Image (spheres, rainbow, N blue to C red):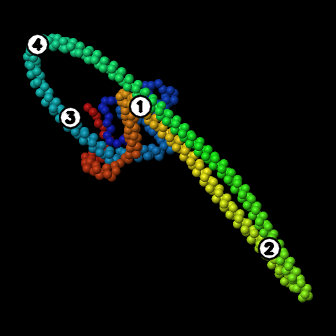
Amino acid sequence: MKPEYFGPSVVPDKKEYPTRMGSGSLRFTSRAQQAALEALARTAQMAPDGEVRTVFMPTKEQMPVCAAAGERRANVAASEWALLDTLEVTLAAAEREAAARAARAAKQQQRAALDRQLSEVQRAKAAAEAAKLVDRQEVMATVAAHHTAQRQRMESTRAAALQVKADRENMLAEARAQREAALAARREEDAKVVARAAAELEAEKAAAAARLAAARERAARDMAENEALRAARRQAEAAQRQADTETSRRMAETMLAQEHARDGAAEAIQAAVIARAGRAGTKALDDKRALIEREERLIAEAAKEAERRDAERAAAEAEKRARQKAEAAAVNAALIRAKAENAAAQREAEARARAAAEARSASELTDAERALLASREKVKLTKRIVASQREENHIKAKYDDIFMTDKERQLNARLLEAAVATVGEPKQLTIKFR
């Protein structure tokens, strides 16, 4: 069975690893776990070193996945990276063997030199013991004198330190009193600034409310005036329409009466002519037909004139409605602008007050608090960097390919040639550490 990784297997010598069977027998197991362990024992084979290797029998559904895993393991074991790892392990083993030979030779030379040095040291040790006794007595006298001088210096230093401490406490008390007085003055000044800003904000709010009320009052007054004008115009237009209708009717009646009078005169003349001639003709029918056609033409012209006046009146009404709509839109726009200006002024005042409060809070922060904030920001930044690096490593480990790319193969061409000439093909090697 080939391993799932490429390169040599590094296994420490004389070290035992617990197997699944061994670790399972050392802990308490339930019935289901015991049954699973017994099934594992039935389907297991023993390796030479006592390692248990399970025999995995894939099902039909697991066959494609197992085949893909086996193919991947084969590709990994036969890749160029595995060949380079084999070359590296081979060269490392050769270097280690050469280093071991050199170390053994150096150890023998060192042992001989140490033997010679040991004899010299033993001779020098006896002479040093005699000189050491004399030196010890001299050192003890020097140490006693040094201790006496050191005690005197410590006493003088302690007195000076107590005086410095008293002076420092006095200075700290004065500085604390000055700082508290300055802080009280600054807080009083800040309270005055905030009160002044609040008063200005209230004044601006009152002015904006007054402007808005005046605009609304003007709009209501304009709307009332426009409504009165519209009512008067509607009454005038209704009276005009009624007068136009009455005039058209009277004109039509007058024209019709005139036509009837002319027709009656014509009929009388025609009857006289016919009576004198003693015969009847077709001229009366033609005249009657012409009269009817003339009446119809006059009625059509009167209807067209009425339609024209109605169209002109509708156009005038549409123009008036458009003008009124534009005026109302202008009033609404003025109201919206006033409201927006009021909101902008309020936001600006709030921003000024917030900026003043933030500036005051920032000025009151101590050095320790600033350092703490900076440390927290640094920790947050470090966490973000570590998270991004972890995500990058995860993506790289997930999507890196098995074989070398063309560029990597070109860069490692000499190493690959040396590996083929040295080891031939990738191998699974075991390194034993001595």
Tags 2 and 3 in contact by the CB under 8 Å rule? no
Tags 2 and 1 in contact by the CB under 8 Å rule? no
Secondary structure at badge 1 equals helix
Tags 3 and 1 in contact by the CB under 8 Å rule? no
**Residue at the spot x=66%, y=61% of the render?**
315
Q: Position of residue 161 (x, y in %)?
A: 25, 16
**Residue at the spot x=26%, y=41% of the render?**
90
Q: Is residue 392 above or below residue 163?
A: below
Disc 4 marks a residue whose amino acid type is Glu
Q: Name the residue beneath numbered marker 1.
A: 360
Q: Name the residue beneath numbered marker 3.
A: 100
Q: Is residue 200 above or below residue 411?
A: above
Secondary structure at badge 2 equals helix
Q: Earlier in the sequence, mark 3 or mark 1?
A: 3
CA gap, disc 4 and disc 2: 161 Å
Name the mark on residue 295. 2
CA gap, disc 2 and disc 1: 97 Å
**Which corner quadrant holds the N terminus?**
top left
**Which corner quadrant holds the C terminus?**
top left
Name the mark on residue 138. 4
Say which of 336 and 391 sits in front.
336
